[in-house]
């Protein structure tokens, strides 16, 4: 019997929700596992709830959810959840760059291994030849001519020079390999769009801080970013993200990371809550005072602002709890009209 397609206009509420969940999973490239289905069901069933609102903020501008986003919102990420933070095109470019870097490092390792094996074989051969030459000179004794001694000496000197050249090649390849590894390590922790540290770098830096170091964290989000993308396109949206990133980095004097989409995370060390909020407000005012235009047409983009939540670490407080308080403060800033900084209690 032929299956009957569901007409969404005539479908029951359950059918519509089922179709919406399928669309949600497809849009975010999530596998149809029960954990992902349950997360999507919670978001779509409670459209006015905190989780749904947070998903809307994160995905504003066409950004897909990441595995970290899902876990941060209380869901469970399984195989099939995207793991990168940037939009689709930067993700592809970044992955290709990393793949090329890995291939380069592997080639360097193979080449270095060959060079070392050759140098070792050359050293072994030289040792044997040196022993043989020494034995020949002992056998010749006083009757050995100066010409014969010179020939054997020249051969030994030539072998020494060849061994030195091999070792010099190995040294250069070691330096190149170290450089390639440093580049790979750096690119894995850098956001390709803004050149800021990425979420991984931020989390690693945060986790490595001694608990005795006073810290303040902030989460910032560009206001109405979807409107920019919808009105002017993603290329202009990328420029706006870069402009906000530069303003935060220039004004806040702390670690600024692109945390995903149009969201940034800031880590202040040995800075109090009031001072951190003051720097954020200075950056926000600087950003809103600028009059950005589309480079190609001169069309005015309008005022670009961001909202920020800022929280000071408390004794014994874990990283997740501190970030949660900053995130809650960001939500209050959004609810109170955006374009403001709210300090967590």
Image: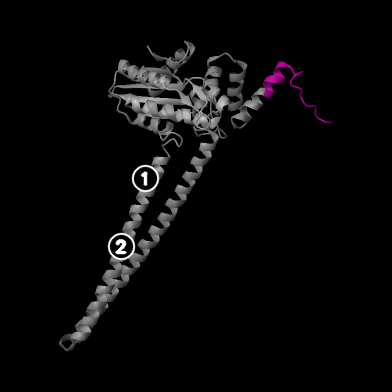
Q: Is residue 151 magenta?
A: no
Is 191 placed left or right of 232 in the picture?
A: left
Q: Secondary structure at mark 1?
A: helix
Q: Is residue 165 above or below residue 214?
A: below
Whole-percent x and y of residue 152? 24, 80
Whole-percent x and y of residue 240? 47, 28
Determine if residue 289 is in view: yes
Q: Quadrant of residue 343 in the image?
A: top left
Give residue 218's mark. Answer: none
Residue 210 versus residue 151: which sits nearer the camera?
151
* On-image quarter of the C terminus: top left
The main secondary structure of the magenta stretch is loop
Mark 1 highlights which residue?
A: 182
Whole-percent x and y of residue 5? 78, 27
* Mark 1 neighbour class, 10 Å CA radius: few under 14, some 14 to 19, many 20 or more: few
Q: Quadrant of residue 306 in the image?
A: top left
Q: Secondary structure at mark 2?
A: helix
* On-image quarter of the N terminus: top right
- Rendered residue at 37%/17% (across/down): 281
Mark 2 highlights which residue?
A: 167
The answer for how far apart the CA atoms under marks 1 and 2 are is 23 Å
Q: Quadrant of residue 217 in the image?
A: top left
Tag 2 or tag 1, which sits nearer the N-term? 2
Residues rendered magenta in the picture: 1-19
Whole-percent x and y of residue 179? 36, 49
């Amino acid at each position: 019997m032929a299956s009957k397609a569901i007409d969404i206009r005539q479908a029951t509420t359950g059918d519509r929700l089922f179709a919406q969940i399928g669309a949600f999973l497809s849009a975010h490239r999530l596998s149809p596992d029960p954990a992902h289905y349950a997360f999507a069901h919670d978001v779509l069933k409670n459209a006015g709830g905190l989780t749904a609102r947070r998903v809307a903020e994160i995905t504003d501008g066409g950004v897909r959810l990441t595995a970290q986003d899902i876990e941060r919102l209380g869901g469970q990420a399984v195989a099939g959840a995207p793991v990168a933070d940037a939009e689709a095109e930067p993700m592809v470019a970044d992955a290709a760059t990393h793949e090329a870097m890995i291939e380069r490092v592997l080639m360097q390792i193979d080449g270095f291994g060959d060079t070392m094996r050759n140098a070792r074989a050359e050293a072994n051969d030289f040792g044997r030849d040196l022993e043989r030459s020494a034995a020949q000179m002992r056998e010749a004794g006083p009757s050995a001519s100066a010409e014969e001694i010179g020939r054997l000496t020249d051969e030994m000197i030539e072998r020494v020079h060849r061994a030195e050249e091999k070792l010099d090649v190995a040294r250069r390849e070691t330096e190149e390999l170290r450089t390639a590894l440093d580049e790979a390590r750096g690119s894995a922790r850098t956001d390709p769009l803004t050149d800021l540290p990425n979420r991984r770098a931020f989390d690693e830096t945060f986790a490595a801080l001694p608990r005795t170091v006073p810290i303040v964290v902030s989460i910032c989000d560009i206001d109405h970013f979807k409107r920019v993308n919808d009105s002017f396109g993603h290329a202009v949206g990328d420029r706006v993200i870069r402009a906000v990133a530069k303003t935060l980095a220039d004004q806040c004097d702390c670690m600024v990371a692109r945390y995903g989409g149009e969201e940034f995370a800031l880590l202040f060390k040995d800075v109090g809550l009031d001072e951190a909020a003051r720097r954020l407000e200075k950056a926000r005012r600087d950003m809103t005072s600028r009059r950005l235009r589309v480079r190609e047409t001169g069309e005015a983009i309008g005022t670009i602002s961001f909202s920020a939540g800022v929280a000071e670490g408390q004794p014994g407080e874990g990283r997740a709890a501190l970030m949660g308080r900053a995130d809650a403060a960001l939500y209050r800033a959004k609810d109170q009209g955006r374009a403001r900084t709210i300090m967590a209690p």
